[in-house]
Structure formats: C-alpha cells, structure tokens
Image (spheres, grey):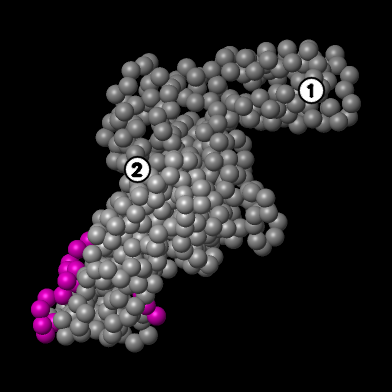
Amino acid sequence: MAQSMAPPVVAARDLASGDLFAQLRTQVEELQRRFEASPPTPAAAYTLEKDLQAACDGLGCSLLEETFNRQEPATKDQAAPRVRYHKQTYRLNKRTKAEVATAFGPITLWSWLYLCSEDGEPGLHPLHVALGIGAGTTTPLLAERVARVAVDHTQAEVRAWLRREHGLSWSNDRLRAALRDFRQALLPWVPALQQERLVQWLQQAEDSRGRHRPVLAAGRDGIMLPMRSGGYEEGSTATVSVYDRRRRRLGTIYLGQMPEKKQTTLSQTLTDLLRGVLRAYPGPLPRLAYITDKGSAPEECYRRVLRQMKHPRDGKPLPWEWGPDFFHLCGYLGKMAEALWGADTPAGARWFAKMRRWLRDRRQGAAQIARSATQLLGRRKMTVAQQTAFWKAYRYLRRHRRWMDYEGYRRRGLPIGSGVTEAACKTVFTQRFKRSGMRWGHELGQVILDLRVVKLSGLWEEAFARDLLGRVMPEPSGRPRKGVPRGSHQASRMPTPCLAA
C-alpha cells in the first residue's frame, strides 16, 4: 500500500531535459512500473490515474508556454515598429512578461508592449490579442470554462474549483473582471442568434403536421431579488416560445433584467427580438400570443408596446392576443370556493373543479362562473374575512373577464398557461440569485444574468464560436529591420485586446 500511494511524479515542466515528449514517456513508464509492481487496488488505481493526469497536464502546460512564446521575435529589431488597431496607431516599446492563466495552470508569456500614439491611452500587447487573452490574462478556453461554471455556482465555489482543477488562486476582483470581459465579448452575437433560432423553430412549426397555425408566444414576469443596497427589488424575465401545429413547444428563448424602474430595458429587448424575428421570417404570419399574469408591467407592455406594434415588413397592425394565465385565474377561483364553502371541504372542492372546467371549456365561461357564485352567495353564511376574500376574487374575475376566452384560445391552438414564463423565474433567477445569504448589485448581477439566459436558451456554444471567429487583429504599419515577425502581427480575425496600463 505504501508503494501504491507514493507521491506524484514531478510535472514535466519542472524537469530540465529538452525533449518534453521523451520526458513524458519516461514518466509514464515509471508510473506503469510502480502500478504493476504490486497487486491492483482501488487506491493504486486512483494514484495511477491522478499521476497520469498530472504528467499530461504538465506536458501540456510546457508545450503551451513554449508555443505561445515562439509567436513573437525575441529581438526588438525583428518586431514591427508600429501596429494599427481600431483606428489607433501604437509604437513599439519594450518586451514584458505576464503570468497567463490557462486550463493547464499558469504560464509565463513574453510579449512586446506597444504604446498608443495618443498620450494617456493604454498600451497594447498584440500577442495577447492574437491569442485571445482577455481580462485577467486568461486564455479563451479557461475564460469560457470559468464563465460556464459561474453561471450556476457562487464566487467561492468557482474560486475553489479553479484551485482544485487548475491550480489557480484568483481573487474575487480577478474573477469578476474575467466574467465581465467574457460577457462583453459574447453579447454582440446574442440578438442575431436569438432571432435565427426562433426563425428556425417557426419554419419547423410551419412544416409540422396538425390542424393549428404555428404560434409565436411571448410572456413576462417579475421576481423579488435581495439587493446589496438593502431590501428587495423586482427583477424581470421574459420568454419567447414557438409552438407547432400540434401545440407542442419547440423551444424557448429567455431574457432577463436586473431590477429597473418600469422595466424599460426588458421591454425594449423583447420588442427588438420580436420585430427582428417577424422581419426575418419569410413564412406566413403565425398566431401571436401574449400569456402573462395581470401584473402592472406585463399589462403596460401589452397596451403600450405589443398592441401598437406593426409588422416590420408591411406596416400592418399585428394581431396580438393577450390571455391572462389560466392557472393564475384558478387561484382566484380557489379563493372564492374557500370563501363560499370553507377551507378543505368536499363541496368546495367539487365546485372549484367544476368552475375550472367551465372556465377552460365553455364560451363566456367567466360570466357563467360569476353568475354561479352570486347565486350561491345568498345561500351561504360567511365571515367578514370570507366576504372580503370573495369580493376581491369576484371583482378580479369581472374586471378581466373579456380576456378569459380560454375556450377560443384552445380552439385556435394558443397556450393558456404561462408555465414557461413562471418556470423562467425559477431557472433564470431563483436557482442562482436567491441562495442563502446572497445579496446582489445591479452591475455584477446583470453580468451573471446575461450569461445565464444565453446558456438556458441553448446558444452558448454558437455564440462563443462566433465571438472567436469575429474578433479583429492588429495590423503592422511598418516593416521590421530584420526578418518578418511571426504570428502576432499577421492580419487575422480573433479576440478583443488586452490593454496594458
């Protein structure tokens, strides 16, 4: 047992030999010899796997460091004297080193610093730009992994994961900088991807078989969040879903916004998304449904935005149909039943079940429920509290009855429940933002929220790939005195710059 639990072999990057692959082979053979020298045990198998991974990671770290450092010339006279980047000119200054965080662990990277021709502007490391090294001197692979973990885990959990899996000790500030940089690079690609995905689902719905027209359904809701400034404020989420001809939901795009007065940013984002989809979709206009509860923000969005929206191609008014959430209305029916019959009574349960069916299946079901309730009112003795609860639910039902055409919604293939949006409050916010002891600031909360909705919408991989392919490189604006510099001064497309103070 003592032999099987021997300490790991020294990593390849710490050995002095020149041939890294030969070193790795030697280490692997030694690890195999140790393992085979004794009968196999779970502890020995664990140690072998752990040591093999450490050896391979050490080789990968050394190879990555060696490869990255070969991308620029070692002498100043071989480097480009000037580069152009984002309409700015930078002049060659000096060679500097930086510790770069990678998936294998930290490496040392030497690169040429270029100073901006305009005083007071930050300098530029073209090699960092070429390699996609962003804020916190982090490689693209590690930045993507960190952001993916941070979507579902707390700062402390992410930092512990970095120490355990990558040998990196990050502060909260460095972690937040890396998340902000990753989110800033990802966001420009997200609206187009959201539109493309919804158009794809609409085309799939149009080609499906069934008796209903495809449906483009929007919804929104709010949720109270604990804030660092004290107390709770209302965050908001929205969903856009596509249903096929059999009323099956093909997919959902999620939106989210930290607390904001009147939720104007979410309204604008939702409006832009819907207009973009209708502009890009070449097929027949789908049915347009807006399913929410009767909160003030959802109602204002319908009255001021959706009801006044025109088709972006022909300018005709769009026929949005607003249906209050069926299950939200059933909650009011339950309060009426409890007021009329008492809590948890068989008669009340039977009346509640019957009224639910009327509301869902009958034309003018809400009006018939109101008549049934008033007829029973004179026969039942109620307390003051029961009367208050009854009339509150009754007034709500009467006030919104013209929107409760659930029989017609179902006949036309429209959804009648806002379960997708209600679930979004849980998946977008509650699971990440309302853990024990959490308090949020608007800025960092929005960073996590933006990344979270991209992942929940299924757009993460494609958005990241477009980001990597869409970044622009610095271009040399002068020739070096000797040779041609490698790598970093060649025009290509890739990440945003890492600016040096």
What is the secondary structure assignment of the residue under circle 1?
Answer: helix
Pick whichever of labels 2 and 1 is earlier in the sequence: 2
Provide residue 436's location: percent of width, then percent of height: 67, 50
Amino acid carrying label 2: it is Gln
Q: CA distance from mark 2 to mark 1?
A: 45 Å
Provide residue 302's location: percent of width, then percent of height: 52, 40
Identity of the residue drawn at 72% across and 24% down: 334
Q: Determine which residue is flagged by label 2.
A: 195
Q: Determine which residue is flagged by label 1.
A: 338
Q: Nearer the viewer, residue 140 or 260?
A: 140
Amino acid carrying label 1: it is Glu
Identity of the residue drawn at 34% across and 26% down: 205
On screen, residue 190 versus residue 7, left or right, reads left
Q: Nearer the viewer, residue 153 or 439?
A: 153
Q: Nearer the viewer, residue 226 or 174?
A: 174
On screen, residue 383 versus residue 153, left or right, reads right
Answer whether residue 489 is magenta in the image.
yes
Report which quarter residue 217 is drawn in.
top left
Report which quarter residue 82 is drawn in.
bottom left
Quarter of the picture containing the C terminus is bottom left
Q: Which residues, given as a range, are shown in magenta?
A: 480-501
Q: Residues within 10 Å of mark 2 (few under 14, many from 20)?
A: many
Q: Vertically, is 39 above or below 160?
A: above
Provide residue 385's location: percent of width, then percent of height: 86, 31
Q: Nearer the viewer, residue 60 or 417?
A: 60
Answer whether residue 178 is magenta in the image.
no
Identity of the residue drawn at 77% across and 16% down: 348
